[in-house]
Image (cartoon, grey):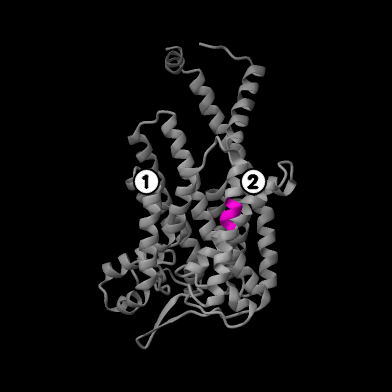
Amino acid sequence: MPNLNFAEEKDFKKRTITTSNSSRLTFLDRTRGLIMLFMALDHALFFWSSGRINNEGLPLLVKGTVTYNPLGNTSLLASLIMVLSSICAPGFLFIAGYVLALSLKKRELAGMPDSNISHHLWQRGILLLLIQVFIASPAFNLPMVIKAGSLTSVTLGTFMSLSILSTFGLSFLVLMLVRHVSPWRILGVSTLLYLMSQLFLPSFAVNFPSNQTLEQALQNILVLPVPFSPDFLVNNNFPLIPWFFPMALGWLYGHTYSEKRGVAYEARRFALSGFGSVTLFIIFRLAGIGDYLHPNGTLQGFFGLSKYPPSPDYFLLYLGIVFLLFFIFYKLPQSSRLGWVLENFGKAPLFFYNTHLWLYAAIPALMANFNGYSLSFGVIIWLIGLIILYPLCRGYITWKSSKRVSVSYSRLLDPSYIWKGLR
């Protein structure tokens, strides 16, 4: 059994961490870190401020006629926040699909058994669903519970108020089942289902009230976002079928990434994809197609797109922006302080998500004053929250790295592992 002294052990840990970090595509972490900050802005305003644009494009059934929730407050600040926050969901899902494809390819090359890979996806999917139900959903619905002043307002629908984490979890389970299918075919089927869901959305909205409870729940999980109601068995703003599309697209890009061509080639690929996607958005928007909310001749109206569910124009614009951000952050020097800060946020996405929700929700809950402040004041609260969250994320990353090194060190000293290497 090898006997490492302190200096050798320190060097081993340093090399392990360096090897792990060198295998990362830093432009992904930087972009994810930036969109996490935008997400925190949106959620901080959700808990603290009034005047925030919300539920844009949500199908509403009024006297048997389907209409779509308009933008509402179209002030410049509210519109800017809407644009920034709208990058988050498609960006998160695309990056998740991309990174997952790369991760599974490495596991397969390392000789991990197929059953272990499936088990890994199953565990991740179930864990995300549990976090959604027991951590994220209670945070989002804290305003309703506090306002009611009674726990009697808490129903099954309060906990089954699904959001982006449940979409991640369900998408992981889907990919577990179809991961041996061609990624091109997965994207093709996903695109077809998405376009069909857009086509039949008005029919789904009309039939929803007359459906049985389980039918409503299934419809809400798969295709139709509806206004929140504690009386529903399930509430969901991010149905699986429309939101699986960016995950499937990321899965394809991850599978077609080639280390031989290098990161520079990948960055150029994203630059071209981003330019093409934004160009198509402009063409479609000027033609008045691809979205339930039509442009009204104003700048805010031009960028006021349906998010619930996401329209084709919405995906073209915001995925295009994400692709361009990949290229921009690739060009940003590795020594950039801004890049370093964003990486530290981007390396702790799940920790950040759960922590920031309760950080921004708990204080107004204690004060019993939800949405009682202006947008400008809400932005200040957002910045204060980021100052608190940054050292927490740094500490989490350090702890996670030390835990990984500890496992690697223990494995190095394991006789069975050494014997396996000698064979």
Residue 203: name its quadrant: bottom left
Give above or below for 267 relative to 162: above
- State the SS at label 1: loop
* Residue most extreme to the bottom: 63
The disc placed on residue 98 is none
Give above or below for 37 relative to 333: below
* Residue most extreme to the left: 212
Residue 115: x, y in percent?
Answer: 33, 35
Is 273 magenta? The answer is yes
Give above or below for 375 relative to 359: below
The disc placed on residue 343 is 2
Q: Which residue is mark 1?
A: 182
Asked if marks 1 and 2 touch (Cβ < 8 Å), the reply is no
Residue at the spot 52% in from the left edge and 78% down from the top edge = 288
Residue at the spot 54% in from the left edge and 12% down from the top edge = 2
Residue at the spot 57% in from the left edge and 46% down from the top edge = 348
- State the SS at label 2: helix
Bounds of the magenta span?
270-274
- Of marks 1 and 2, the one in the foreground: 1
Residue at the spot 27% in from the left edge and 78% down from the top edge = 210
Residue 9: x, y in percent?
Answer: 62, 20
Mark positioned earlier in the residue sequence (1 or 2): 1
Residue 323: name its quadrant: bottom right
| Mark 1 surroundings: few (<14), some (14-19) or many (≥20) residues within 10 A | few
Assign the magenta stretch its main secondary structure.
Answer: helix
Q: Give, as a three-letter code, the residue at label 1.
A: Ser
Give above or below for 186 relative to 398: below
Residue 246: x, y in percent?
Answer: 47, 57
Q: Is residue 361 visible?
A: no
Q: Give, as a three-letter code, the residue at label 2.
A: Glu
| Mark 2 surroundings: few (<14), some (14-19) or many (≥20) residues within 10 A | many
Q: CA distance from mark 1 to mark 2?
A: 32 Å
